[in-house]
Each structure stands twice: as C-alpha cells, then as structure tokens.
Amino acid sequence: MNKKLFVLLLFIAGFCGCTKPLIETPPDVPKLPGGNNSLFFPLQKIDFTNSDTTIVFGDSWCDNGFDPNNFTKIFADSSRQTIFNTAATGFGSGNMVSKAYETMNTVHNHTNVIALCGFNDVRFWGATTEQLNFQKNAYRTLLVNQFVDTWRPAGSPSRRGGSFTSIIQPLTPHFKSFYSTGYKAAYTSSVNGVYLEYDFTGTNVGVSFVGQDTTAMASYEQPHGRWRVLIDGVVIDTPQIHQQTQGHIPGYMAPQKIFPYIRIYSGLTAGGHVLRLEPIEAGNKFVDFIFTLRDPDLVRPVTILEIPYMTQAGYFADPSANKGSDAAIDLINNAIAEVREEFTSIDPKFSKKIKIIPTAKFFDKNTDYMHDLIHPNTGGKTNLFKALKAHVNY
C-alpha cells in the first residue's frame, strides 16, 4: 500500500447535489472607485437553490429577538427561504459552534448556512493569538459539521489499549461528542501502553482534539497533554493543543477555556486505513471525535460575511468592549479566509461551497450604523442584504 501521504493540517472542534453557480453581474454590486467599471469582473455566486432552508448563525446583527427586521429577514422575504435563525446577541462565535451541533444534521446536513460571527469577540479581546486561533477553530468546526460524511465519538474506537479514565466523558456543549448517546469523548491521564485506533475508508480523516487556553487556567488546573497521530503506522503529526481558544470571556458566556481543535489529514490513497492516536506526555488528554469529509459535490453551501469595520468612535463606544480596530478586524477576517483556503486545498471543489463576502464593500461604516455606533441602521441592513443578494443565487 502506498504510504506516501500529503498531509494538510487544519488547526483547531452537512447537503446533496451541486449545480454550477450562476455567473452574472448583479445590479446591487458596488461600483469601482473613479467610475471606471469596465474592469469589473462578474461575481461567481454560490448556489442556494438546492435547499429551501437556511440556518443563520450570528449575534445581534442577525438576532430576531434584538431586531426582527434584520438583514436576514430581508433575505428571507426576498428569497422565500425558510430561515432557522440561531443568532443570539453578545454570544459570539462560541455560540455558533454549540448551535451548529444542536441544530444541524449529525451528518449530511441538508440546509444552506449563513454566518456573521466574531464581531463582539474582536471588540472584547482584539486579535490576540488565542483569539485568532479561536476564530479559526470556530469556523473550521462549522464547516466540518456542514461537510461531515462519517463520524464517531472518540470513546468508540475500533481498538484501544491501556488505561482510560473515561470513554463517556461529557465535555462542554462546544463539542460534538457532547450530543451523542452512549460513548462520548475519550479521556486518559496515562501514557504507557495507551492508544486509540479507528478504522476508516476514504482519502481524508479528521480529528477533533481539545484545545486549551493555558493563560485562563485556574490555579488548580494543569496544561493538557498531547497526542501523536499515526496513519497506517506512519507518524504524521503531534498537534499543539495550547492557546487554541480564548478563555477570557464575559461571565454570561459559556466557558471556552477548552474548545474544539480540528486537524484534517488528506491526500490518502482511496480505500481502508487505520488512524492511531498515542499520548506522548503527562497531563490529562482528551479527544472529542473522529470523522471523514463528504465529496463537495454532495454538500450544501456555507456563506460567511466578513466582520464589518467600525468608526474610531464606534470602537470606543462601549468601555467594556473597546479592543477592536480596523487592523484587528483585518486579522480576524484573514484568519477566516485561511480556513476556507485549507478546505479548498483538501479539494478545490470546496471553493464552490464556501463563499466569503467582503462586507466592507457594501456596508459603509460612516453612514450605516445607528446612533449607538454598534448596530446597523435601516440603510446598513439593506446594504448587508445587498451583499448577500450579490453573492448568493436563490
């Protein structure tokens, strides 16, 4: 068997049919500066026509409870899509992950997805290393849950050896195994003789490890230990699990000191393989779940709106959430774009299933905010809808 592997590492933790997206110049696309639009290239729209239902993830900008006439409501009225809105004011990208696990199909999710998350996260914490990794992991988890083909809780391996504290370990609602019945996450504090093996078929396999923010640990807590990853007996990775989440959060949010940390290994030869995990150091060691990805031709699409800029006054409008800036938002948006690139590296066909909308080309930070400088006004909501309309075929 050819053991030469092309390994794509995704740092962190579904839809049928595909038609070619329409390529056209929509009437609401913004014009280029200077009035010279002869160089404008038509947008490649993402196709929402294979499902009549869309799940929305976000915070106050999408939250029907905060604003029942938000831009996703305008989109619903225009598209005649049934919108299942999970947005919750102030809860950020962590809430997106838990709501994805609660509301999406366990595999082969059959709905479209719209997400605008991270706005409050960057306002609270800026763009620290932990924050950048947290946003990457949140969006990776969303995409994996949308594109997953097969999965199993880590506590249900094909074979295991050594001593395990638990194979039914409940983690937080941010982890997929939390929602399974029976087996859940695998948890051990041992090293010698400990292993987990999973048989799988396909050209890719992924592992949802448990990332940790060691800067947010309580005095009695210790850093988690790491795992070594082998495929067909070949060592291919030793994931770095620390600083993969933002653990310093407001008290009303669900704890995020631990968070999904997903890595995907692709480029395998078609057929059967064995994934093996071995602990390599002291400390508690957790694994959430194991999965494979579906063929992109068979999945439903995900549309992500970039986090919008604020005015300088807007960044300081709330003294408890004044860490944002244009530069910080650029870093977060670039991190999210990197996640899309990682999926297209696994299979270029994912480029037709993940659309990132450049919100700033439609939403004017100088005119589109309410007087509070934090939430979109009527014009801003209309422009956010125009951003969707320009990029989504429905």
Image: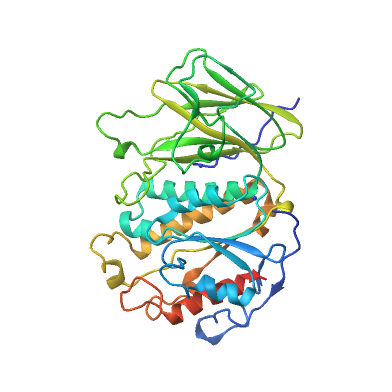
User: How is the model colour-coded?
Assistant: rainbow
Residue ID at (37%, 59%): 90
Q: Is residue 189 left or right of residue 196?
A: left
Of residue 253 and residue 145, the one placed in the foreground of this image is: 253
Q: Is residue 295 left or right of residue 115?
A: right
Of residue 316 and residue 55, the one placed in the foreground of this image is: 55
- Residue 290 spot, x, y in % from top left: 59, 34
- Residue 162 spot, x, y in % from top left: 52, 14
Q: Quadrant of the N terminus?
A: top right
- State the residue lying farthest toward the bottom: 35
- The mark total stands at 0
Of residue 240 and residue 379, the one placed in the foreground of this image is: 379
**Quadrant in which residue 229 is drawn:** top right
Q: Quadrant of the C terminus?
A: bottom right
Q: Is residue 141 above or below residue 379?
A: above
- Residue 180 spot, x, y in % from top left: 56, 37
Q: Is residue 84 above or below residue 72?
A: above
- Residue 199 spot, x, y in % from top left: 68, 27
**Quadrant in which residue 212 is drawn:** top left
